[in-house]
Image (cartoon, rainbow, N blue to C red):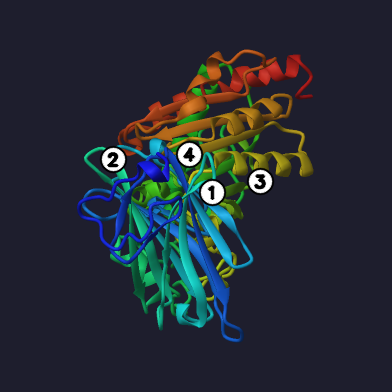
């Protein structure tokens, strides 16, 4: 729609021009004909005390709230999972958010265009303006000049859907409570700066008890004797089930492997962490490491927007490890880099991990580790995720590039979300050996150990044989 075709909305007020770059006053609105727009915030620093400004966007449902923390796009989380909203980057006195209106999910009714000021208030700035551009042509659709005083967060405008038509409204509302106050108003769970907590209480040593004798053919793993009695007994039973599954699927007697655990820590996993589901997964996977690798250690990674390597899981320290390191990602609003205040030694700052799904990054990280730390045995990666995968091409590229590496990737889907390319790997051509396994379960807590280990280890033995035949394994 050209500026000459623009007709004021019946509810619009404050329109002062009919040419491209319609100037709106606070509360005014205008139809948006473009399928994708670029919201450009500009300002002029007023000298000493001028803050650093960052643009952001919140995707809201008809109830005026986000669905979860992933609906907040800002400098620590620059791209929405749908790809429809993106923090496009900033320059001198400008910051930009791109919105593909046609790609927004059906339940998103509003996109709030906001900004935060770090190190001062918006009142220290002059020339504060929001310009809405047609992302395709670069033509200016509307502009809104704003004034501010003591605000440290500001809603410049919003895109909203009305009767199937997208419109832009000039808002000009500020917050003295910063980005945290703004985000909380729209339903974001804010990761506030925590007070320094007391150090975790040490796990009480278990009462002396006779450890169950290992079944014939089972190795006693280093550190196993330091586990609490009930955990030792459970571990012994699980190792027996794992041995049965390995034999059933043709594994050679005494097969060994380095086991690496990868845990999805994205925002959608929050309930699974809170309910102890992920703790249970780790405990069950520790039995796999104890069966295949008798050094009593398992390497582990966590990931969401970015990956982070966790301290090695030593079997004898399993209870403490579960308490310290099985944690969901966090959304940090307090600067691009957060200190380690309040973290126990070795704990990962989960605000650096974030809350979005970027599986390809952790896959690349693990591949690099395997190359830099070669071992004689094959590597089995146990990768747990609740889906929401959207980086299909990047994930496929990483796993195809790793096909001749001594690594088998066993993915386990938690729930019934979108698992994308992982579900297709069994039929993807062009690989000399199938280096990827995948299955999903609706509720892993209802899957017995026998069933879980049977699925988990169903493809690994045959991959070992094929990889040896091709010279990938010695």
Cβ–Cβ below 8 Å for labels 2 and 1?
no
Residue of label 2: 165
The span from disc 3 to disc 1 (Cα, nearest Å) is 25 Å
Q: Circle 3 is placed at which residue position?
A: 295
Task: Choose top left, top right, bottom left or bottom right for residue 471.
Answer: top right
Residue receiving disc 4 = 384
* Dot 3 crowding, Cα within 10 Å, few <14, some 14–19, many 20+: some
Question: In the image, which is nearer the foreground, mark 2 or mark 3?
Answer: 2
3 or 1: mark nearer the eye: 1
Question: Residue 283 appears at what percent x and percent y?
Answer: 45, 46
Please state which of the two labelled residues, at mark 2 or mark 4, is closer to the viewer.
2
Which quarter of the figure has residue 172? bottom left
- Quadrant of the drawing holding the N terminus: top left
Labels 4 and 3: the sequence-earlier one:
3
**Disc 1 target residue:** 303
- The mark lying in front, picked from 1 and 4, is 1
Q: Is residue 290 visible?
A: no
> For the residue labelled by badge 3, is the local secondary structure a helix, a strand or a loop?
loop
């Amino acid at each position: 729609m050209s500026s000459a075709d623009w007709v004021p909305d019946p509810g619009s007020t404050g329109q002062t021009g009919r040419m491209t770059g319609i100037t709106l006053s606070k509360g005014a609105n205008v139809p948006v004909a473009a399928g994708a727009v670029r919201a450009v915030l500009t300002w002029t620093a007023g000298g000493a005390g001028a803050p650093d400004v960052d643009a952001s966007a919140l995707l809201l449902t008809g109830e005026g709230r986000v669905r979860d923390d992933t609906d907040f796009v800002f400098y620590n989380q620059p791209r929405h999972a749908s790809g429809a909203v993106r923090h496009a980057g900033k320059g001198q006195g400008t910051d930009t958010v791109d919105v593909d209106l046609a790609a927004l999910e059906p339940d998103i009714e509003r996109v709030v265009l906001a900004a935060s000021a770090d190190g001062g208030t918006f009142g220290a700035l002059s020339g504060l303006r929001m310009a809405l551009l047609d992302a395709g042509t670069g033509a200016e659709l509307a502009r809104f000049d704003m004034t501010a005083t003591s605000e440290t967060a500001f809603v410049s405008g919003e895109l909203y859907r009305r009767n199937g038509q997208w419109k832009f409204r000039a808002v000009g509302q500020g917050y003295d409570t910063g980005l945290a106050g703004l985000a909380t108003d729209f339903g974001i769970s804010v990761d506030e700066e925590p007070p320094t907590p007391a150090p975790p209480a040490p796990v009480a040593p278990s009462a002396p008890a006779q450890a169950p004798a290992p079944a014939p053919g089972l190795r006693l793993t280093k550190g196993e004797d330091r586990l609490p009695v009930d955990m030792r007994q459970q571990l012994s039973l699980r190792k027996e089930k794992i041995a049965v599954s390995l034999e059933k699927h043709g594994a050679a007697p005494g097969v060994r492997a380095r086991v690496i655990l990868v845990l999805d820590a994205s925002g959608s996993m929050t309930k699974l962490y809170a309910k102890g589901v992920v703790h249970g997964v780790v405990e069950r996977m520790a039995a796999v490491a104890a069966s295949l690798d008798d050094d009593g250690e398992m390497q582990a990674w966590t990931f969401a927007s970015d990956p982070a390597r966790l301290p090695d899981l030593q079997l004898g320290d399993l209870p403490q490890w579960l308490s310290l390191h099985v944690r969901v990602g966090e959304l940090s609003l307090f600067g691009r880099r957060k200190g380690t205040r309040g973290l126990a030694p070795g704990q990962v700052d989960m605000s650096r991990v974030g809350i979005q799904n970027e599986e390809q990054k952790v896959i690349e990280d693990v591949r690099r580790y395997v190359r830099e730390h070669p071992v004689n045995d094959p590597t089995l990666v146990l990768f747990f995720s609740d889906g929401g995968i959207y980086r299909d091409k990047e994930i496929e590229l990483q796993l195809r590039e790793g096909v001749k590496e001594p690594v088998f990737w066993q993915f386990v889907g938690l729930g019934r979300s979108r698992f994308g390319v992982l579900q297709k790997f069994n039929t993807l051509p062009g690989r000399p050996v199938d280096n990827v396994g995948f299955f999903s379960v609706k509720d892993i807590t209802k899957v017995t150990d026998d069933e879980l280990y049977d699925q988990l280890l169903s493809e690994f033995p045959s991959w070992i044989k094929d990889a040896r035949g091709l010279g990938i394994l010695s």
